Image (cartoon, rainbow, N blue to C red):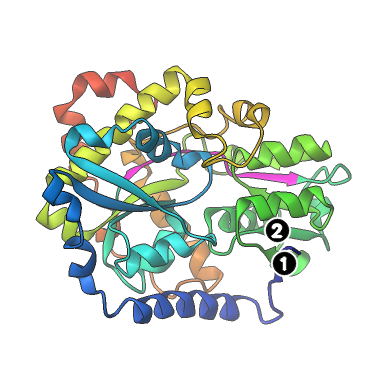
């Protein structure tokens, strides 16, 4: 089966915005019958003493707190049955959340911004994983200047897409200088690069390491020189009615993420063994090598303005036509969890202070 290499159209930004708007609108229409209560009241697990929470998610290491917690059954001790909901295409996670098909999600914050400006039904309540956005070039491509006229692959409106745009802008280039092609998921993107169908990819870990190792390619940038250390990637997002109606559940989930972060940081090899295969379609060597590039990070309270700042790049690309309002980020419950669990907070490495 061939790879879906979707080129960026000639008229560029307007078409990209139309694509995103259509995706969100279609999802809202398709879920109109389920309503907000359709998800909130569907938790039959209540009758068994548990509250089911459905999570959308991506495929990168920034999702590991969710994956690890689900496999280790961390949610159970809080009376929560955590269910991860598979989404086939990058970006679908935000649609699942905006339409009410899931109550929580671990998604790139830029996808969340795009969905939020059309359906402000959720808020970012904490982080999940930091850094790990990596641009890898084939062996002959050693700099951004070498990218001119080349095929660059990534996911649309993703943090990885904005990374390309921001790097090009820094280098005095635009999307007109390259041939952008959008793919559906990390495995597809990695395989297309290894097969030589793409010259450069903007990818997440552990797939960026896999792509570099398989081709003996070059890392062109990892975002740290552009954004600084500790920049966020995936964030934990929660529908607003759940925050309002049952903040304790949201706080318990944030606490679970902190517990998972502490264990992942102390023994990444165990975390890798727990999640490889089912969640990460790569080899163990690549997964272990990628550990430092994209660590877990729940406390991103000092990254609020950074996330809002990326909305400017999204407007320049016409992915959105307005800024998200202040309620896009709500760290109130994160603050409470940290204040109430000082011993747990001391165990994690990523801190805003």
Q: Residue at point 32% right, 65% down?
A: 101
Figure quadrant of the N terminus: bottom right
Please provide the residue range marked out in magenta.
126-136
Residue 351 visible in the snapshot: no
- Image disc number at residue 5: 1
Residue 85's x, y, as percent? 40, 55
Whole-percent x, y for residue 166 in the image: 60, 55
Disc 2 packing (10 Å; few <14; some 14–19; many ≥20) = many
Question: Circle 1 sits in a helix, a strand or a loop, which is it?
Answer: loop
Pointer 1 local density, CA inside 10 Å: few below 14, some 14–19, many at least 20 = some
Residue sticking out furthest to the front: 48
Mark 2–mark 1 distance (CA, rounded to whole Å): 8 Å
Based on the displayed image, in which of its 4 quarters is residue 116 positioned? bottom left
Q: Using residue 246 as the reference point, say whether residue 353 is left or right of it.
A: right
Work out whether mark 2 precedes mark 1 in sequence or the reverse, and give the earlier one. 1
Q: Are marks 2 and 1 in contact (CB under 8 Å)?
A: yes
Reply above or below: 176 against 158.
below
């Amino acid at each position: 089966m061939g790879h879906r290499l979707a080129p960026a159209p000639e008229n560029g930004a307007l078409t990209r915005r139309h694509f995103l708007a259509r995706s969100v609108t279609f999802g809202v229409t398709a879920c109109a019958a389920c309503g907000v209560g359709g998800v909130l009241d569907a938790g039959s697990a209540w009758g068994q003493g548990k509250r089911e929470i459905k999570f959308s998610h991506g495929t990168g290491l920034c999702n590991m707190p969710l994956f690890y917690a689900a496999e280790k059954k961390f949610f159970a001790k809080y009376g929560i049955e955590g269910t991860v909901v598979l989404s086939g295409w990058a970006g679908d996670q935000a649609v699942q959340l905006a339409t009410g098909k899931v109550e929580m999600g671990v998604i790139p914050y830029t996808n969340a911004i795009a969905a939020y400006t059309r359906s402000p039904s959720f808020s970012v309540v904490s982080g999940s994983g930091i850094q790990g956005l990596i641009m890898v070039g084939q062996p002959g491509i050693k700099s951004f200047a070498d990218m001119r006229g080349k095929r660059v692959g990534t996911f649309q409106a993703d943090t990885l897409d904005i990374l390309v745009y921001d790097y090009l802008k820094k280098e005095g280039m635009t999307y007109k200088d390259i041939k952008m092609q959008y793919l559906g998921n990390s495995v597809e993107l990695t395989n297309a690069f290894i097969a030589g169908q793409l010259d450069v990819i903007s990818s997440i870990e552990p797939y960026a390491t896999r792509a570099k190792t398989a081709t003996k390619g070059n890392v062109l940038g990892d975002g740290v020189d552009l954004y600084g250390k500790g920049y966020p990637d995936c964030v934990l997002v929660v529908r607003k009615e759940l925050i309002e109606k049952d903040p304790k559940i949201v706080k318990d989930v944030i606490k679970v993420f902190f517990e998972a972060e502490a264990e992942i940081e102390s023994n990444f090899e165990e975390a890798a063994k727990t999640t490889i295969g089912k969640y990460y379609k790569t080899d163990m060597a690549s997964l272990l090598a990628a550990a430092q590039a994209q660590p877990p990070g729940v406390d991103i309270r000092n990254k609020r303005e950074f996330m809002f700042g990326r909305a400017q790049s999204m407007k320049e690309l016409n992915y959105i036509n307005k800024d998200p309002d202040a309620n896009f980020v709500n760290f109130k419950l994160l603050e409470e969890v940290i204040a109430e669990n000082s011993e747990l907070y001391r165990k994690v490495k990523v801190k805003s202070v």
